[in-house]
Amino acid sequence: MPDDRRDSVGGGRGGSAACGEMGGEGAQWIGMAPFTDHEHFVQNIGDGIFMYSGSLAVRAAVAAGVDITYKLLYNSAVAMTSGQDAVGALPVDRVARLLLLRGHLI
């Protein structure tokens, strides 16, 4: 990971910047970004949490105008809670279309 980038998953050359709560993935960067020299943040988010509540964090980051990359990990499960099926899950193409329609993909 480049030295000028932070992530919330740990490891890498850039290091881990923060942990977030379920559904708030990446939202910490909204508050952190103005107070750091780092220009970019990378946030992993699973498809189960994305469909449950994480899409709101993506919308908040877009509205705040912060420089963040979300990596949507699509595995059709909520791994955080022992791998249940992702209720309300959409196929990858529909998730991409949803993000495009909301103006979240650039």
Image (cartoon, rainbow, N blue to C red):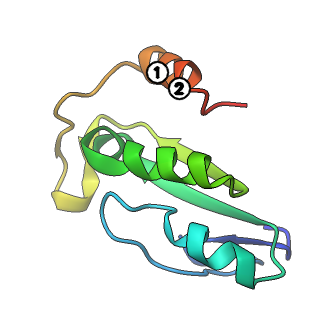
Whether 30 is drawn above or below 68: the answer is: below
Residue located beneath label 2 in the image = 102
Q: Amino acid at mark 2?
A: Arg
Quarter of the picture containing the C terminus is top right
- Residue at screen point 82% across, 68% down: 39
Q: Nearer the viewer, residue 62 or 88?
A: 62
- Residue at screen point 30% across, 63% down: 22
Q: Amino acid at mark 1?
A: Leu
Q: Are marks 2 and 1 in contact (CB under 8 Å)?
A: yes
Q: Position of residue 90 (x, y in %)?
A: 32, 22
Quarter of the picture containing the N terminus is bottom right
Q: Which mark is residue 98?
A: 1
Q: Quadrant of residue 42?
A: bottom right
Q: Position of residue 32 (x, y in %)?
A: 63, 78
Helix, strand or loop at disc 2?
A: loop
- In space, the residues marked 2 and 1 are separated at their CA atoms by 6 Å
**Residue 12 is at least partly visible in this image:** no
- Residue at screen point 61% across, 27% down: 103
Q: Position of residue 86 (x, y in %)?
A: 21, 37
Helix, strand or loop at disc 1?
A: helix
Q: Position of residue 5 (x, y in %)?
A: 78, 70
- Residue at screen point 20% across, 28% down: 88
Residue 39 horizontal side relative to residue 75, left or right: right
Q: Residues within 10 Å of mark 1 (few under 14, many from 20)?
A: some
Residue 89 horizontal side relative to residue 101, left or right: left
Residue 51 horizontal side relative to residue 2, left or right: left
Q: Residues within 10 Å of mark 2 (few under 14, many from 20)?
A: few
